[in-house]
Structure formats: structure tokens, C-alpha cells
Image (cartoon, rainbow, N blue to C red):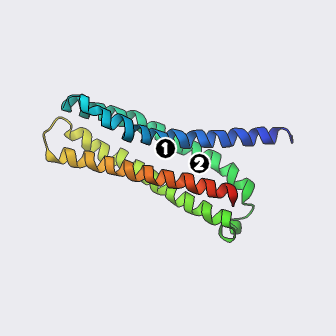
Amino acid sequence: MSRIMPIFNAVIFWLHILAAVTWIGGMVFNLLVVRPSMGVVDPPQRLRLADRILRRFIPVAWISVGLLLITGLPMTLQRVVSFEGLFETGYGNILILKLVVVLMMILIVALIRYELLPKFESLIDTQSPELSKVMGRMVSLVKINLTLGVFVLLLAEFLAFA
């Protein structure tokens, strides 16, 4: 049994890192590579492409969130042995901050998926000025989420040394 635990821990940690890299890296790729490259696509097609990209990426983000939560729990239980430990240790305090920031990120993804994306899709064939407002709001929220994600990575590094 003692030989299995290090392997289990390594796999859990690897899955946790993989999920974080997928979610945060996907946002980096979309903002810094895809979005600037879309200028060569005709405007009506650009909107449809943006819609398809979001429709494909948001499930990837949700899977990443699920993996992060599933793998984060055993990692936490190894370091925090009691509920009080969350509030009485540096590790616990950093972890609480990290979880609050991740919750904010999850709420942003939900806002984009369940409020803004349907609104965007309903306006995609119109010339409504509301369309560019919705698109701008989605881009702004992804930028905020990316910033929060980078901060979470910093907090994760602090956890490693706490």
C-alpha cells in the first residue's frame, strides 16, 4: 500500500496541473492567438467562428473545473487534517483565498455560458449595436478570468511552500 500512495498522489497532482493548464492555457490561446488572428476572416464569418470557438471551449473549461475540484480535494486532505486547520494555518488561509478566486472564475464562466453566449447567438445575424457590446463584455470577462487564473497559479505556488 505504501508504494501505491506516491503513485496515486503523483497522478492526482498531474491531473490537477493538466486541468489548470488546459483552462488557463485555453484562455491565453484564445485571447493572444485566435482573437488577433480572426481579423483575416470576413466579419459575418468572424462572429460565427467566435461562437463556435466559445461553444467548444466552454465544455473544456467545465471539464477542467470538475477535474480541479475532484483532484484538489485529496490534495487538500493530505495537508489540512481538520476544519480548524483551514483557518489556523498559512496553508489553509492561502487555500481559502485560492478557492474564493476559483469560485469567481467559475461564476464568470457560468455568466458567459448561460447569459452572454445565448444573447450573442440571438444577435449574431443582426447589425444591432448590442452585438458588439455583448462581444466586448465576453472578451472583457475572459480577460478578467485569465488574470484571476494567473493569480490562482501564483497562490498554488505559495501553497507549495506554505
Q: Earlier in the sequence, mark 2 or mark 1?
A: 1
In which quadrant of the rendered view does residue 157 lie? bottom right
Instruction: Identify residue type, mark 2.
Output: Leu
In what quadrant of the picture does the N terminus appear?
Answer: top right
Residue 14, given in percent of the width and then of the height, sits at: 65, 39
Q: Any mark on residue 24, and which?
A: 1
Residue 13, given in percent of the width and then of the height, sits at: 67, 43
Specify the farthest residue to the bottom: 88
Q: CA distance from mark 2 to mark 1?
A: 15 Å
- Label 1, residues with CA under 10 Å away: few <14, some 14-19, many ≥20: many
Residue at (20% x, 28% y) in the render: 42
Specify the farthest residue to the left: 127
Viewed as shown, does residue 58 lie left or right of 11? left
* Secondary element type, mark 1: helix
Q: Nearer the viewer, mark 2 or mark 1?
A: 1
In which quadrant of the rendered view does residue 161 lie? bottom right
Specify the farthest residue to the right: 2
Residue 122, given in percent of the width and then of the height, sits at: 22, 40
Of residue 26 and residue 73, the one placed in the foreground of this image is 26
Viewed as shown, does residue 19 lie left or right of 133? right
Of residue 64 and residue 83, the one placed in the foreground of this image is 64
Circles 2, 1 touching at the beta carbon (< 8 Å): no
Query: Could you tell me how many numbered marks the image carries?
Result: 2
The reply to whether residue 8 is in sight is yes
In what quadrant of the picture does the C terminus appear?
Answer: bottom right
Q: Any mark on residue 69, and which?
A: 2
